[in-house]
Image (tube, rainbow, N blue to C red):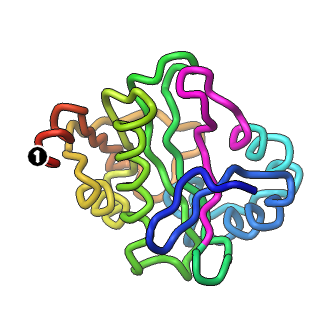
């Protein structure tokens, strides 16, 4: 399968149906899912019926998918996924950045490396004008990746969740990077 994007250590490629076992393992690690669903297990059916279709969706505004499987270039091992998808399907101007990596990939700089490469591609090739990212306020590791990627804190907010998880009482945070800010940093 052709790569969508390569970095020094990573290959980002489109998802396929063959990725179901990888996604099942990733989404059933309680630590990986701690800030997503509180670490609750996810079934194979949920991966096939809900998760995979979202990951395979093509966005007309960018002419690409919004999610990519990430592999370690040296070994070909599945590390997780990255997201850079338009908030509105047909409009590439505002995209959401996201990432979910398995625990073996944590603390190695992969999240920052992949996120930076995606942000650069968004601004140079996909017509992006603004990148946004959100996480729980207590998710310090994800917030640090956002900052190292060049995004800056925009706001804290709270939402009402049907199934609150530990830490959700502290709310969410949003980070942002505009094309103008990105261009200034590159100059």
Quickly name the residue at label 1: 187
Q: Is residue 151 left or right of residue 89?
A: left
In the depicted structure, whether residue 128 falls above or below residue 23: above
> Horizontal and vertical percent for residue 34?
53, 64
The number of callouts visible is 1
Dot 1: element: loop
Q: Residue at x 32, y 52 (%)?
A: 137
Residue stretch rendered in magenta on the structure = 54-71
The residue closer to the viewer here, 121 or 44, is 121
Q: Quadrant of residue 115?
A: bottom left
In the rendered image, the quadrant that contains the N terminus is: bottom right
> Horizontal and vertical percent for residue 8?
44, 72
The residue closer to the viewer here, 98 or 181, is 181
Q: Residue at x 53, y 54 (%)?
A: 5
Q: Is residue 22 left or right of residue 133?
A: right
| Residue most extreme to the top | 90
Q: Residue at x 24, y 33 (%)?
A: 178
Please check the rendered image and state whether residue 164 is part of the magenta-colored stretch, yes or no: no
| Residue most extreme to the right | 45
């Amino acid at each position: 399968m052709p790569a969508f994007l390569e970095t020094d250590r990573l290959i980002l490629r489109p998802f396929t149906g063959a990725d179901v076992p990888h996604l099942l393992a990733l989404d059933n690690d309680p630590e990986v899912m701690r800030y997503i669903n509180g670490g609750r297990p996810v079934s194979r059916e949920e991966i096939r019926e809900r998760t995979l279709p979202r990951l395979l969706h093509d966005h007309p505004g960018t002419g690409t998918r919004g999610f990519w499987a990430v592999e370690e270039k040296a070994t070909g091992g599945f590390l997780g996924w990255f997201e850079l998808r338009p908030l509105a399907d047909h409009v590439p101007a505002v995209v959401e950045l996201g990432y979910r990596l398995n625990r073996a990939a944590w603390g190695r700089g992969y999240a920052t490396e992949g996120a930076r490469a995606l942000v650069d591609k968004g601004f140079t090739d996909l017509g992006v004008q603004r990148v946004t990212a959100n996480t729980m306020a207590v998710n310090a590791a994800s917030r640090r990746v956002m900052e190292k990627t060049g995004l800056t804190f925009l706001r804290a907010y709270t939402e009402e969740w049907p199934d609150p998880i530990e830490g959700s009482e502290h709310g969410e945070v949003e980070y942002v990077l505009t094309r103008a800010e990105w261009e200034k940093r590159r100059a």
